[in-house]
Image (spheres, helix red, strand yellow):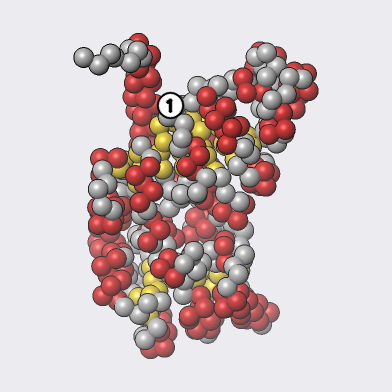
Amino acid sequence: MKDWIGERLSAMISSSTGVRIRRSLGVGPAQVANHELDQVHIAGDVIVYFSDVPNRAYQLEQWLPTLENLNRVHRVVLVFRKVQSLRHFHGQTKLPKIFLRRFDDLVNFCTFNDFKLCLYVNNGVANFQSLSVPELVHVHVNHGESDKLSMVSNQAKAYDKTFVAGPAAVERHRAVLIDFNLDSLVQVGRPQLDSSFKSPIPKFAGRTVMYAPTWEGENDANNYTSLEIFGERIITSLVSQPNTRVVYKPHPRIATSTDKAMVAANARVIEILHEHHLTGGKHLVDDTDNILDLFEGIDVLISDVSSVGLDFLYLHPDRPLLLTDRRDNVDLLHREVPVSRCCPVITKSTVDQFLLNLTTHFDELDNFEEHQKMRSFYFGDLEKGQSTDAFISAVTDLIEERQHKLDSKARGSAVPNPE
């Protein structure tokens, strides 16, 4: 099936020019019934629904290896609601892709095919259009595991199931949501971390430290970035350390930020690193490589409250992890962000003194057991490779259960007469 299978879908949805429809879709005659587009049957079990624009593509990109593994067991089709996003993913995966612009297109596509389950990687507003299809099992999988406020939404009640990484996410939902059925949560670990990662950066004889700030969020409550608060001071301190290489890896949405302070801070950090690179430093600014690959080449991570720090904790619990707190309230941070209890924390009131003694936090990790316990709290006791199995098994169980219910409903579809 061609990647651009649905680019003309809206224009052709009611067309009866069978030859042109078949050619545009790139499908054979056996796949076209009565030359009507809404009757094209596509073999598949699972829809992965992405309704957002390309600057949020990272939310789906990190799932692609897992979805390709899932595709070996259950056929997967990627559904896009923005044609720009469809084009963005061209060449990134061989999974079938389709663009459905109108609500009617979406409903027809789901109705005239035999999909059993739909996965959602975010809480986009247009998700609710897909949720209107009753035959599907609707499963929210999100795009990371973190303690950000946005990780728990009352929208979770709209999905049949929500896949989460481990006990921390369950407790997060229990603490925040009212009248929420915790039985709808399914712990599957973090399948995205099961892949093999290889560092794209050259080897370095000294110490490599990554600074990976998150973006400013949709509102102040979801703002966890340290970049415009003390990002420049962190970078200035790092480049002054002997035998130290700095890798700057900003969140993908920092590049498109409309916040002037964020734009200026990002530019200043890049400027500092560029100046020191020209004078012999080996520092890097990386806005293209997979951060999980970059982890393989770094010794220390400095990050904000986000999935980045937790992913690093899972993959490298033996390496130092430093967190930041823009709210300058460590007691609150310890309550809301449990991982902070086993990591040094940079705050607004302590940043200057902290940076004076920065390298003391880069020494050999002395609380490895605490890191391991926190790793289990966030991701369960699954080892690398087992999360993908748990994810596929959970999808299989839900598909089989839904098929059984659909079959039972078909056998007893008549509405009983009231007594």
At a point 47% along the width and 49% down the height, the residue shown is: 122
Q: Splitting the image into 4 quarters, where does residue 345 fall?
A: bottom left
User: Which percent across, then down, holds residue 252?
Assistant: 57, 61
The answer to which of 185 and 362 lies nearer the viewer is: 185
The answer to which of 117 and 107 lies nearer the viewer is: 107
User: Which percent across, then down, holds residue 132?
Assistant: 46, 35
Q: Quadrant of the C terminus?
A: top left
User: Which percent across, then down, holds residue 239?
Assistant: 54, 81
The answer to which of 406 and 15 lies nearer the viewer is: 15
Instruction: Find the residue positioned furthest to the left.
Output: 419
Vertically, is 261 above or below 165?
Answer: below
Vertically, is 374 above or below 47?
Answer: below
Q: Residues within 10 Å of mark 1 (few under 14, many from 20)?
A: some
Q: Which residue is mark 1?
A: 135
Q: Quadrant of the N terminus?
A: top right
Q: Secondary structure at mark 1?
A: loop
Query: Amino acid type of disc 1?
Result: Glu
At a point 33% along the width and 74% down the height, the residue shown is: 344
User: Which percent across, then down, holds residue 116?
Assistant: 44, 26
Q: Is residue 345 left or right of residue 2?
A: left
Instruction: Find the residue positioned furthest to the top.
Output: 411
Vertically, is 96 above or below 412?
Answer: below
Camera sees residue 340: yes
At a point 62% along the width and 58% down the height, the residue shown is: 288
